[in-house]
Image: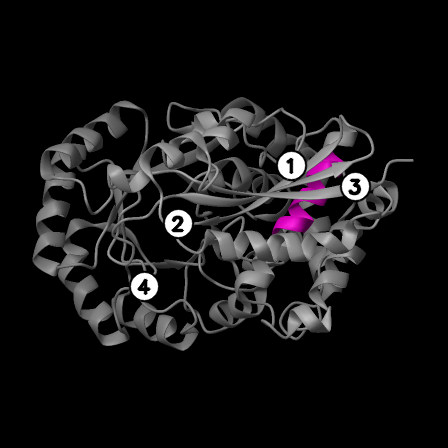
Amino acid sequence: MAIVTAAEVVDLRFPTSAELDGSDAMNPDPDYSAAYLRLRTSDSDLVGHGFVFTIGRGNDVQATAVATAAERFIGRDVDGLCGAIGDAARELAWDSQLRWLGPDKGVMHMAAGAVISALWDLRARRQGLPLWAALLELEPKELVDLVDWTYLRDDLHPDRARELLEERTAGRAARLDARHRDGLAAYTTSPGWLGYDDAKLDRLCREAVAGGFGLIKLKVGHDLDDDRRRLAIARAAVGDDVAIAVDANQRWGVDEAIDAVRELASFDLRWVEEPTHPDDVAGHATIARAIDPVPVATGEHLANAVLAKQLLQLGGARVLQVDATRVGGPHEILAMLLLAAHHGVDVCPHAGGVGLCELVQHYAFVNAVAIAADPAPLVVEYVDHLHEHLAAPIDVRDGRYHLPDAPGGGGAFRDEACATFAFPDGRHWASVGAGA
């Protein structure tokens, strides 16, 4: 019988600000970072991996929160935890001491998500399966029972969620075969970081087209005249057959967003992402009505499934963008996928940042095979940074994600990455004299 023996958390930070990779109107100089958890067990070959993504300063706070959330499972039986992960998730979510710091939002909520992700990584590794396959092994009722429906059942009752999954079972085998054959479409944000000069923007746009991407995304929101100029460069580079989305990263107020999108709509926008504060679901609905037919896309900063429910109820988004580490773990992501299917909204996951592509691809494939009514319009974000530091990097070819086959959830970092980029004592940070 294996037990959990330790919860090791590493403050990993990568110096992406040096080249302005990841720069946008709200985050001009991010250092992509991860509060990285390894759940050790008495079986030395069995380790569960999970993390929370941040952008540098404050990652130490997130790492402390992950350690606090994980410590309750030290000494617990691995069979019991992996066999009842839904119970473990509810145990964390309803801990009154931790919940007081949220509830269901912020540093502690994301920390709980990292712990539940690590437990699922343990379970999938024991099964010898990638996470997407471990989830697809579950019956509809088992998937539904993972979700905490306390605040969601007024919109989507768990019985209806189960029916929705059962309705999708008829075509699951064919959809899975298609995913094995064709993968899932990716879109790339790599050309569009706000700090890149015009020549780099033009070059990366052309490289994206050559690489098979049918959709690119540009960051906007710092200056409207600059946004127009950069969009003109991008449109000239990619031509009329490649779609362009824009992402304001929450930079605008509601009226400002409406005015800006109307100014930029002539570039034939696939969507406008995060046009205003992520909690302002009513504001998103106002924007969505005003800028139609340009779709609103949002979700990477939604703190929980309750906000996603409200956003969808009000018609505030035609594209929902789940993030793999913002909410309370796989079960809350599953809830958001089910809510989106219930409302007829496509899920196109957020995946910028270190390791997020590796994590979120599993949920994207589960959605495409078992939940979404139509997988054809689904796309998954891709950035080309830092994948070499993951133990099982993504396989993106010809503008498409291909099914991962390595056991686990994709959140394991290489030992060399930890030795080099642990903050502040890893080799890189020690060499540059990192400050707090």
Helix, strand or loop for disc 3: strand
Labelled disc at residue 56: 2
| Residue at 16% across, 57% down | 264
- Of the image marks 2 and 4, the number of the one nearer the N terminus: 2
- CA neighbours of label 1 inside 10 A, class few (<14), some (14 to 19), many (20+): many
Task: Say whether residue 253 is magenta.
Answer: no
Helix, strand or loop for disc 1: helix
Q: Position of residue 113 (x, y in %)?
A: 62, 54
- Of the image marks 1 and 2, the number of the one nearer the N terminus: 2
| Mark pair 2, 4: CA separation | 19 Å
| Mark pair 3, 4: CA separation | 41 Å
Question: What range of the chain is rendered magenta?
Answer: 114-124
Q: Which residue is mark 3?
A: 5
Total marks shown come to 4
Q: Which residue is mark 4?
A: 250
- Of the image marks 3 and 1, the number of the one nearer the N terminus: 3
Task: Name which residue type carries label 1.
Answer: Trp
| Residue at 39% across, 38% down | 14
Q: Left or right: 95 with respect to 411?
A: right
Q: Which residue is mark 1?
A: 132
| Residue at 73% across, 57% down | 89
State the residue in front, 254 or 374: 254
